Image (cartoon, rainbow, N blue to C red):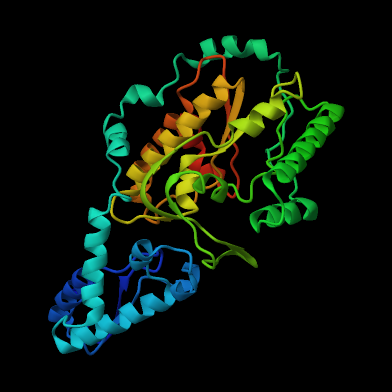
C-alpha cells in the first residue's frame, strides 16, 4: 500500500490495535512507521489505531482490582490514544527515547516470562493433540443405535437452555455477590428455581429438559470465572449491539480447568426427573470470540486450550449421569476472517476445537449444539463437519 497509494493521498497507518486490550509493541510499530515514511515521507502519513476504539474499554485507571502485573500489560482506549501520540512524536523525533517505549519493552518482557501466562502442563497437552482426540468412538449409525436407549421420539422437543433471568434471580445474585446473602441461602434459592423449571417442563411434555441456568450471569463470564488464564474487569464495558453492552473477560494466559464447573447443578436437576436432562456448556469458539484474547500466540492455539477444558467438563457431566450434553457455539460465524481466502483455515481449527470438546464421550451420549446470530449459508458445511 505504501508503494501503490498515490503520493498526493494521505495514508492512515493503523499501527495500534483497536481490537485488543494489550500494550502496543512500540518498537515494532515505530519500525513499521519508519519503513513507510522512507517510502512516502511523513507529510501525508497519519499515525492511527487500526479501527474505531468503540469496542475497547475506555479507561484502565478505573480498574482497581486487577493486580499490578496484569494491569501493566494492558492498554484501554485512552492508553491507545497515548500510544498513537507517542509513536507520532517518536517518528518526528527520529528516536524512541521516551518513557512509554521503556514501559512497552518492560511489559512485553514481563508477559513473555510470567509463569501465570505459561503453563507447561497445558502446553504439553496441546502439543500431544492427535486426530483421534477430535473423533467420536464410532460412526453416526452406531451412535444412533446406542442412543436409542434414551427413548426419544423422531423429533424430540427441547429448549435452548437458558430460562429468563427474572428480577428476583438478578436481585438474589447481586445480593450474594455483594456478601449480603450467604451461600446456603443463595443455593437454596437456586435449587427452588431449578425445581420449578423442571416441573414446568414436565407439565408441558418437553422431551429433553434443561435446568434453566439460573446460577449463570453470562454464558462466557460464568465459565471464564472458573478457568485459569482468565481475568475480569470492573468497568470494561463495550458495546455489543444497539444499547446492549458486555464486559468481556480477558484471556491473558494458558487456559485450564481447575475443577468441575457445571456438574453440581446439572446432576441435581437430573435427580429431579426421569426425563433426559441436558448438560449445558458454552463452546470453545464462542468463549474465544466473546473474550479479549491474548495476542502472543495464534488464536487457534488458545481455542485448543479452551477446547480441552470443555472436554474435561463434558467427561465429568457424562460420569455424573448426563446422557445429553449441549455445547453452544453461537459465535462460530462471527469468527470468520474478513478475507474469504482465510475462511477455510479458520473453519479447520474452529471445527476441530468443537470436536475436541465433544469427542471424549461414549457412543450412548448425545451431543447437541445451539447456534444463532449467524448467516447459516456461510457455515452450513462446517456445521456438518462438527
Task: Count all numbered tags in the image, as a single digit.
Answer: 0
Give x and y (percent) for residue 38: 12, 80
Residue 83 left/right relative to 338: left
Displayed quadrant of residue 326: top right
Give x and y (percent) for residue 311: 46, 30
Give x and y (percent) for residue 81: 37, 80
The answer to whether 34 is drawn above or below residue 114 in the figure is below
Residue 38 left/right relative to 89: left
Displayed quadrant of residue 102: bottom left
Q: Which residue is at a point 70% across and 18% down the rendered structure image? A: 154
Displayed quadrant of residue 96: bottom left
The answer to whether residue 5 is seen in the rendering is no
Give x and y (percent) for residue 160: 68, 38
Tell which of 149 and 214 is nearer to you.
214
Q: Which residue is at a point 73% across and 41% down the rendered structure image? A: 190
The quarter of the rendered structure image containing the N terminus is bottom left
Amino acid at each position: 500500500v505504501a508503494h501503490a497509494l498515490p503520493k498526493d493521498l494521505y495514508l492512515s497507518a493503523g499501527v495500534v490495535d483497536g481490537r485488543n486490550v494489550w500494550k502496543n509493541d512500540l518498537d515494532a510499530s515505530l519500525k513499521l512507521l519508519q519503513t513507510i515514511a522512507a517510502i512516502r515521507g511523513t507529510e501525508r502519513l497519519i499515525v492511527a489505531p487500526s479501527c474505531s476504539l468503540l469496542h475497547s474499554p475506555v479507561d484502565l485507571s478505573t480498574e482497581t482490582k486487577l493486580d499490578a502485573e496484569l494491569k501493566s500489560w494492558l492498554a484501554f482506549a485512552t492508553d491507545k490514544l497515548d500510544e498513537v501520540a507517542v509513536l507520532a512524536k517518536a517518528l518526528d523525533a527520529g528516536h524512541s527515547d521516551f518513557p512509554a517505549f521503556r514501559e512497552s519493552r518492560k511489559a512485553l518482557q514481563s508477559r513473555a516470562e510470567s509463569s501465570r501466562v505459561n503453563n507447561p502442563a497445558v502446553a504439553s497437552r496441546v502439543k500431544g493433540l492427535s486426530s483421534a482426540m477430535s473423533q467420536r468412538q464410532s460412526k453416526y449409525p452406531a451412535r444412533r443405535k446406542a442412543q436409542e436407549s434414551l427413548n426419544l421420539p423422531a423429533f424430540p422437543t427441547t429448549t435452548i437452555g437458558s430460562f429468563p433471568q427474572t428480577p428476583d434471580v438478578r436481585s438474589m445474585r447481586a445480593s450474594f455477590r455483594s456478601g449480603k446473602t450467604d451461600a446456603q441461602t443463595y443455593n437454596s434459592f437456586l435449587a427452588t428455581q431449578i425445581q420449578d423449571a423442571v416441573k414446568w417442563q414436565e407439565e408441558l411434555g418437553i422431551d429433553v429438559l434443561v435446568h434453566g441456568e439460573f446460577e449463570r450471569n453470562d454464558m462466557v463470564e460464568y465459565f471464564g470465572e472458573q478457568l485459569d488464564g482468565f481475568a475480569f474487569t470492573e468497568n470494561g464495558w463495550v458495546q455489543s449491539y444497539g444499547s446492549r453492552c458486555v464486559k468481556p473477560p480477558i484471556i491473558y494466559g494458558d487456559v485450564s480447568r481447575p475443577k468441575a464447573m457445571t456438574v453440581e447443578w446439572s446432576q441435581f436437576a437430573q435427580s429431579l426427573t426421569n426425563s433426559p436432562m441436558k448438560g449445558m456448556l458454552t463452546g470453545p469458539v464462542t468463549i474465544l470470540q466473546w473474550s479479549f484474547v491474548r495476542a502472543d500466540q495464534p488464536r487457534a492455539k488458545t481455542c485448543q486450550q479452551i477446547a480441552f477444558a470443555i472436554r474435561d467438563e463434558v467427561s465429568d457431566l457424562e460420569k455424573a449421569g448426563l446422557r445429553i450434553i449441549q455445547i453452544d457455539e453461537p459465535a462460530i460465524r462471527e469468527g470468520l476472517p474478513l478475507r474469504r481466502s482465510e475462511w477455510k483455515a479458520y473453519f479447520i481449527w474452529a471445527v476441530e476445537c468443537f470436536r475436541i470438546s465433544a469427542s471424549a464421550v461414549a457412543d450412548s451420549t448425545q451431543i447437541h449444539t445451539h447456534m444463532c446470530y449467524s448467516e447459516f449459508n456461510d457455515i452450513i458445511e462446517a456445521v456438518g463437519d462438527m
